[in-house]
Image: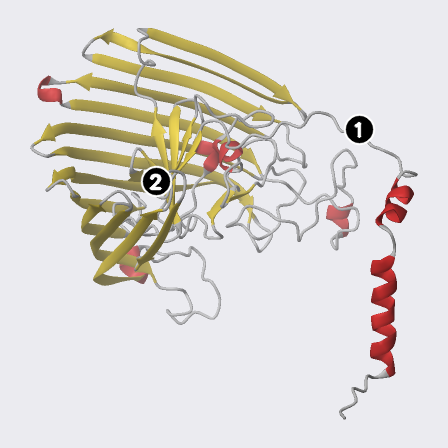
Amino acid sequence: MYKLKLPTKTIFLLLFYLIMFSVPGNAQISESKNEDVIQLETLTVIGTQPGVDITAEKTVIDMERFKKPGTAATLTDVLSEIGGVDVQQANALMASPGDEVSIRGLNEGRMVIEIDGRRINHTGHYGRYIVDWSTLTLDDVEKIEIIRGGHSVRHPFAIGGVINIITKKGAPQGKKFSGRVNTGYGRYNTWNANAWVSGSVNRYVDFNFSGGEQETDGYLRNNSQDTRSFNGHVDIHLPSQANLSLGLKHTKVEYGMPVVNDPNDSNAAIAALYDPDYPIFTRGSDQLRHLNWPQLPGRNTPKWEKKTNYLDAIFTMPAGPGTVKIHGFMTDGHRRTSLYAKSGSFRENVLSKDRTQGVIAEYSDMDLFDTHSLTMGIEYQELGNPSDIKVIYRVKSAYIQDVITLGKKWTIIPGVRYYHLDKATFYSWMEMGYDAQPPGWPFAYENSGKTETDAGFFPSLKVDYKITQDTTLYAAASKSYRLPCP
């Protein structure tokens, strides 16, 4: 006869569980009667955020319907409310040149920021492809589109995704004229005021004009900011359902660089200038993303002044099964800086320029055979500093994308973009044989530059499967190109 032998520890555990489960349920209930009862107030649960529409293709924010806790005074205020979009603010009081926006951890160096479908990232020669969010105001924004990932070949250099700012073109439907004035005031003498007016002169011309100003004394010492903006858009309706849209966004930003404010600074002279009216700000504290050395207090005032113009002319016209679009554009920036160099010397009123210009020709949404929607286009861009170096990059590209609908559940989106780049960049001073950075660096391109050419095809594929009316699964794979930093 087989005898089951259990270890002593096992027997004790079994007895413990039997005792625990044999305790009557009302024993526990009687104990709970002695506990305090907390009465909760009414809770309101909102399923989706007002004004935010999410699909497998993109997220669309309608600024007329968008709502958030508090106020939305800047684009970064809006983007910070969207899942998967991370906003790091250098100045929490208003949008500043040091703000950084990322999609799934990839910042503007690996994603694309657009106005009405065209790229506005800088070349990288001055600023590593960053976007100065202080130059982008909400005054004339109608919608914001967010595309995650690099699966759409219609947007060049988009590895992490796309943020496309769609501007207002005229009065709301059914209104001949419309206008609004907004103002607000906050801590640290922070205030903003803006106004816009839109309408139709007749059935051939629509317009939208807006302007505003934002100002703050800043939380940190010397971190004041004054942003002034003007936006103008005119739509001209032509025969054959053609349309010509002209746009201008102008911004002037005066930004004070926060200075060291530390009574224990390693330099006794700097420590003696400590101002207790402001928070402590050490040499190791964060500065602007592309300026990683400290600015100092004293008789010199570290600051920058920047003027930025975004110019656009867009012609659209239906033609056959699709729509023709020709988009000419220019981004022109002038920045004057007065800053301490890493060596400690103060350089005043230094001018730098950055310009991007080009044209896009596209034939889109060609509906073929009831299951295909084809888009193809070509694009030419020149990116660079218009003074010393006329063009840093000359980019020629062509693309084609098809949206294939298979029944009510499957959508397949294949595409490919071809790039051809002519690049003119600087040698580093180390490559030229110097032991240290020489005076006057960087030199003119003729003395210290190199040229390169790069070309290739970059395909993408996205597959959507619609499970229910509100649920879609998708998978995407793509090969993307990142514009090299000189």
Q: Amino acid at mark 1?
A: Gln
Count the marks: 2
Q: Residues within 10 Å of mark 2 (few under 14, many from 20)?
A: many
Q: Residues within 10 Å of mark 1 (few under 14, many from 20)?
A: few
Residue 322 placement: quadrant = top left
Query: Can you give x and y, in whole percent of width and height, for residue 28 in the image?
Result: 87, 47
Secondary structure beneath label 2: loop
Looking at the rendered structure, which numbered label has been put on residue 39? Answer: 1
**Position of residue 151 measured from the top left corner of the image (x, y, whole percent):** 31, 52
Asked whether 58 or 290 is in front, the reply is 58
Asked whether, in this view, residue 22 is left or right of residue 443, the answer is right
Looking at the image, which is closer to me, 327 or 23?
23
Q: Which quadrant holds the C terminus?
A: bottom left
For residue 353, what is the image quadrant?
top left
Q: Nearer the viewer, residue 161 or 128?
A: 161
Looking at the picture, how far across and down is residue 449, in whole percent?
30, 61
Identify which residue, 149 or 97, lies in the foreground: 149
For residue 120, the mark is 2
